[in-house]
Structures are given as structure tokens and as C-alpha cells.
Image: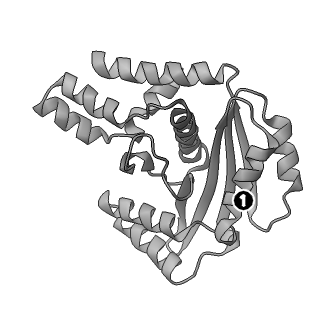
Amino acid sequence: MTWAAAAVPRHYVAADEIAAVLRELGKPEAAKVLSGKLPVSKRTRSGELGEILGTQYVARELGYRMIARLRWKDSRDMPMRGDDLLGVRMVDDDKLEFLKGEAKSRASLSTSTLDEAEAALLSEHGLPTPHALMFVAARLREMGETKLHVKILAAQLRGRIRPSDVLHLLFTFSGNNPLKLLRNHTKAYKGKIRRLGVGLQVPEHQAFIRRVFEEVIRDARTR
């Protein structure tokens, strides 16, 4: 659980923002900044923890550049639009590869949930949604990654993204064993875009989520 709690804060608040608040206002105010960004409802916490875990997996295991998009939410309990997971990596100076992913968090994963994710993955002919691409590109520019920003814009605006440049990821975080469901769903897929299914099982799914967010808040107040 500690590993999950350690990953959560930076997905809501940038490290330099917290550092600035700590320096200028002190620890209690820094804790309030983070706590004010965290979701309150069980449903939102579940979905966003699944997205955070999926983002961590894509960045660390698959090597795509990811952004912590939850930092730009309008409201702590309102879901964000666009692709759950959108990663990009530069293969060489002229070629980009994209990851379009859906993250699903359920106490009991079902076929209908996977079908819902499938529909989202196949939107825009299976390619990353234009709005999500523009959003990621803008955030990368703000972080100083101007070369990648321009490459993404060029690929999007000039229609250079092909199905062969995209990998689909169906990431699940559930209380029940997802292996059979993901295996059957992946075997049934007949599309042209490569598809990867990854499942993380935590038997005490709801209790785990509650404890993770409790630890995040406790650590923010005591460190």
C-alpha cells in the first residue's frame, strides 16, 4: 500500500508547487493544498487510483512519456474528458509512437466493463483523440519539452498518425482475478491496432483504495 500512496501526490500537485508552499507558508498549508486536490467520493477515488497505477505502469514498464493529467482537473470529483492514458515516445528524430489506454477500476471486474473500455479505445478509429493529444502537447511545452511538443502537433495536424504507430492498453485494477476476462477479451479482438491487456488484482479492492488515500493525507500532515 505504501508504494501506491507514495505515487499519488505528484499526480495531483507538482513537486515544485508543494515545495514553494512549504517554503512560503509552512507544512499545514502545504497539506491543505494537496488535500484540496484529492477526490472525496469513493467512485472517483477508485477510478483515479486505477488511472494513476496505469500511468505508472506505462511510464516505467513500457517507456512512454506520460503526464500527470489529474493536476489539471476542474473539480476534485469531476472526471476528466479524453483518453485515460495517453503516452508518446520518440523512436528516432522523425517517428513517434503513441499509447492510447483505458484504465478500469472495479471491485468485481466484468465483461461489460471491458466492453466499455473497448468502445473508448476504438473511438476516433482507434487513434488518440485530438483533444487529448493537444492537451498533452501543451503540457509538455509548459514543462520545456518543446521538441516533443512540436512533433506531436505536426503528427496530429498533418494527419501522420497511423494505426501502426499506436498501441492500445486495457489496464484493469480489480478485486477479482482479471486473467481469464482479459485473455478472452484480447483473443476476441480482431482490430489492426496492437492491443495489450494488463490486470492488477488487489483482493481487498475498496479497503485498499480507502487506506491509500488515508495514508496520503496522513503523510502530508506529518512530514
Q: Please state which of residues 1 and 165 is positioned toward the viewer in this rendering.
A: 1
Q: Which residue is mark 1?
A: 119
Residue 71 x, y percent position in the rendering: 37, 46
Q: Which residue is depicted at the point 44% across and 61% down?
A: 136
In the rendered view of the protein, which quadrant contains the C terminus? top left
Q: Please state which of residues 60 and 201 is positioned toward the viewer in this rendering.
A: 201
Q: Residues within 10 Å of mark 1 (few under 14, many from 20)?
A: few
Q: Please state which of residues 19 and 47 is positioned toward the viewer in this rendering.
A: 47
Residue 143 x, y percent position in the rendering: 32, 56
Reply above or below: 130 against 174.
below
Residue 42 x, y percent position in the rendering: 53, 30
Reply above or below: 221 against 201.
above
Q: Residue furthest left?
A: 24
Tell me, yes or no, if residue 47 can be seen here.
Answer: yes
Q: Residue type at mark 1?
A: Ala
In the rendered view of the protein, which quadrant contains the N terminus? top right
Residue 89 x, y percent position in the rendering: 53, 60
Q: Residue furthest bottom?
A: 158
Mark 1 element type: helix
